[in-house]
Amino acid sequence: MAKDTRKMVVKVNQNVCVGGGLCVLSEPEVFDQREEDGVVALRTAYPDPSQYDAVLSAIRKCPSRAISVEYED
Ligand code: SF4
């Protein structure tokens, strides 16, 4: 099967994030937390392909389903 070369774009919903920081543990170069309340903040919406697995892992672990990804050509 051909490798998917589309670019991953990460989105977070700060309105539902509960601020536990599991996503940061999964991929600290993509996810961060706001200083004042711990709510998720993105360091980048465009992770390197080497980080895709960690981003998908963060999605699975997020208790509030605040993280999603789309793919761009
Ligand atoms: S894992 Fe989910 S709920 Fe926890 S800080 Fe990250 S986005 Fe927010």
Image (cartoon, rainbow, N blue to C red):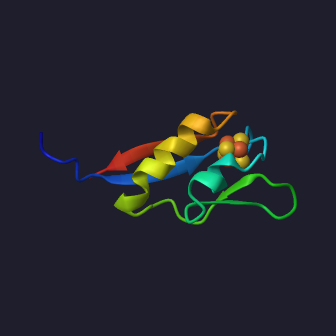
Lateral position of residue 3 relative to residue 7, left or right: left
Q: Position of residue 12 (x, y in %)?
A: 61, 47
Lateral position of residue 51 relative to residue 68, left or right: left
So how many labels did they put on this image? 0
Depicted 66 relative to depicted 42: above or below: above
What residue is rendered at 12% in x and 45% in y?
2
What residue is rendered at 27% in x and 52% in y?
6
Depicted 52 relative to depicted 18: above or below: below
What residue is rendered at 51% in x and 42% in y?
57
What residue is rendered at 59% in x and 66% in y?
43
Depicted 63 relative to depicted 12: above or below: above
Lateral position of residue 5 relative to residue 56, left or right: left
Q: Nearer the viewer, residue 18 or 51?
A: 51
Q: Nearer the viewer, residue 9 or 57?
A: 57
Quadrant holding ligand 1? Answer: top right
Q: Position of residue 23 (x, y in %)?
A: 63, 49
Q: Position of residue 5 (x, y in %)?
A: 23, 53
Q: Position of residue 18 (x, y in %)?
A: 78, 41
- As drawn, the residue found furthest toward the right would be 36
Residue 68 shows up from this direction: no
Residue 49, quarter of the rendered image: bottom left
For the N terminus, give its image quadrant: top left
- As drawn, the residue found furthest toward the left would be 1
Residue 52 shows up from this direction: yes
Q: Nearer the viewer, residue 9 or 62?
A: 62
Q: Nearer the viewer, residue 54 or 12?
A: 54
